[in-house]
Image: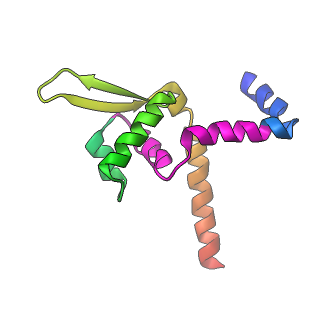
């Protein structure tokens, strides 16, 4: 209920609407953040698992983006005390809540691709 009220309030003010879009983009913008979140969405992943799921991402870029997503509260980095040390990434509640957005983007992408192909 609270989420719906906040959205109605923001939709009544174009400035707040645009600021809210900017807040979202500050967290998820860039070429790699959404694919990274999409990869981790299906369960905890190790660095190499994420890299394997995202063709063409460099280890340096993946490391940078993972740090930014962690700083923005979208994922958690868990270091397991084992030999060798194992590091896993998982989504926070906030990161998990982006599922709805990603699902809509996938749905739109499929429809858009079909429309462009069929003309």
Q: Residue at x 29, y 45 (%)?
A: 49
Please determine whether, in this image, residue 62 is positioned above or below residue 84.
Answer: below
Membership of 111 in magenta stretch: no
In the image, residue 2 above or below residue 75? above
- 89 up-or-down from 36: above or below: above
The type of colouring in the image is rainbow
Q: Furthest-right residue in view?
A: 12
Q: Is residue 64 left or right of residue 88?
A: right
Magenta includes 29?
yes
In depth, the one of 83 and 23 nearer the eye is 23
- Residue drawn at x 35%, y 59% is 56
The location of residue 50, given as percent across then percent down, is: 33, 45
Residue shown at the point (62%, 57%) measured from the top left: 108
Residue 100 % position (x, y): 59, 40
Residue 35 position, x and y percent, is 45, 49
Tell which residue pokes out farthest to the bottom in this image: 119
Residue at image position (60%, 70%) is 114
Image: magenta residue range? 17-44
Q: Is residue 65 above or below residue 8?
A: below
| Residue 89 horizontal/vertical position (percent) | 35, 32
Q: Quadrant of residue 25?
A: top right
Is residue 111 left or right of 58 when viewed as pictured? right
């Amino acid at each position: 209920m609270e989420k719906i009220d906040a959205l109605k309030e923001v939709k009544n003010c174009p400035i707040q609407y645009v600021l809210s879009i900017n807040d979202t983009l500050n967290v998820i913008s860039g070429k790699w953040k959404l694919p990274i979140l999409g990869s981790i969405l299906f369960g905890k992943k190790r660095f190499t698992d994420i890299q394997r799921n995202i063709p063409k991402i460099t280890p340096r870029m993946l490391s940078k983006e993972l740090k930014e997503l962690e700083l923005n509260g979208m994922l958690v980095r868990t270091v397991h005390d084992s030999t060798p040390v194992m590091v896993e990434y998982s989504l926070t509640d906030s990161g998990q809540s982006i599922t709805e957005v990603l699902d809509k983007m996938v749905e739109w992408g499929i429809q858009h691709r079909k429309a462009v192909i069929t003309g």
